[in-house]
Amino acid sequence: MDQPRKLYIKTYGCQMNVYDSERMAEAMGGAGYTEVQSPDDADMILLNTCHIREKAAEKVYSELGRLRDLKEANPDLKIGVAGCVAQAEGAEIMRRQPLVDLVVGPQSYHRLPEMEARVRQGGTALDTDFPPESKFDKLSRRPRARRAPAAFLTVQEGCDKFCAFCVVPYTRGAEASRPAARIIDEAKDLVERGVREITLLGQNVNAYHGAGPKGDDWTLAGLIHALAEVDGLERIRYTTSHPNDMADDLIEAHASCGKLMPYLHLPVQSGSDRILKRMNRNHTSDAYIRLIERIRAARPDLMLSGDFITGFPEETEADFQATLDLIEEVRFGQAYSFRYSTRPGTPAAERAQVSDAEASERLQRLQALLTRQQREIQQSMVGREVEVLLERAGRQPGQMVGKSQYLHAVHVTAPQAAPGDLLRVRIAASATNSLAGDMIAE
């Protein structure tokens, strides 16, 4: 019998890429591959790429250059590039790096096994189409192996917003939502394998409008309420959202659905109305603030996370100060912040650019403010009781690490506990990026 071949996947970027890498590994498992943790052991290496960060394509080419020695030592090694850089660069990847055997976009990875078969016959394979069939319809049923207690589940892909700085509409395509019944079936399957928390994923997840079981149209709120009925599923989260799609029924779900966690990632990017307009965000800073007020009225203990860009083209010091003012008013428990970097083909790339030095200096000031807020909110947790979903063993004997309902990492001494347990914990101390707590006896 043939020995199973070995697959190594390196994942860049967002949670959706993590989900996609899992599904690619499952698809290749049906083609006789087992996943390994080191490229040195692999018969095939897949780089699942992200195009959001600065110089994303060049970083991929650098990584491919580092794989050259492995390819020379093992000419039978197959190397593939998947994900958003693959979609954006296409055949250019193979031209610049002939060691690459296959390139597959994020909407076509269900075709990986047949592409691999062509490559094994001595050819190359390129597929960056937006196929008419859904990849989710073509992927095989997920294997029955046990899972970590928290998992991602993609429910929506693509984006129709066309923010001036973003490549997602070009690499992931138009918004598309999976049918609700298939999402619920996948969620049940995950729960049967040990999952207790699911994060629903989408480039613009709160724009979800999927076909319901009776042919009706379901919103994200409807999907969340249905998933809350799944026995054994204890926690539901979703990311990433757009303020303009924060519908009334979704706000209400934060009040009425106990399994929906009190954590929301809702990017705003800037506090300047002038810059928001240039970004094509189609909302104002005041509209964002009023929206947060409504959501917090529905769920007073909500912890908020956001995204921010400094140095967007034409941003002035006054524009930047407006961002700092918004942050001071809203208060964020977590945030992701970046210096603007151009994405070829996007409208913002053609505009007058802020100098790297100025953008970097603003980023440092913005991150200092966000870090202060994060630490203040973490410190406010000391003395409070939280519920922690344990995920893994900690570094100390008897220590376990998990996530609170607010997505804080929490360390707790619980020698009899196991991953997947939900514990009541009283927070005793706050560290830089985590909390420490004591288990509360039942």
Image (cartoon, rainbow, N blue to C red):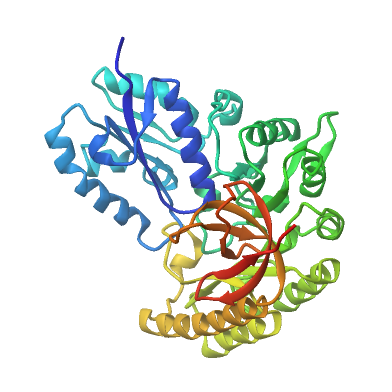
The answer to whether 197 is drawn above or below residue 80 in the figure is below
x and y, in percent, of residue 115 in the image: 38, 24
Q: Examine the rendering and report whether any part of residue 283 can be seen.
A: no
Tell me which residue sits at (54%, 58%) in the image.
Answer: 401
The answer to whether 175 is drawn above or below residue 274 in the figure is above
The answer to whether 54 is drawn above or below residue 390 in the figure is below
Name the residue at the top extreme: 1
Nearest the eye: 83 or 8: 8
State which quarter of the image contains the N terminus. Answer: top left
Tell me which residue sits at (67%, 58%) in the image.
Answer: 241
State which quarter of the image contains the C terminus. Answer: bottom right
Taking the image as shown, residue 181 lies to the left or right of residue 276, namely right
Tell me which residue sits at (60%, 45%) in the image.
Answer: 149
Choose top left, top right, bottom left or bottom right for residue 334.
Answer: bottom right
Q: Examine the rendering and report whether any part of residue 371 can be seen.
A: yes
Taking the image as shown, residue 65 lies to the left or right of residue 306, namely left
Nearest the eye: 105 or 342: 105
x and y, in percent, of residue 289 in the image: 75, 76
Taking the image as shown, residue 405 lies to the left or right of residue 106, namely right
Nearest the eye: 112 or 58: 112
Tell me which residue sits at (71%, 50%) in the image.
Answer: 235
Choose top left, top right, bottom left or bottom right for residue 185.
Answer: top right
x and y, in percent, of residue 102 in the image: 32, 32
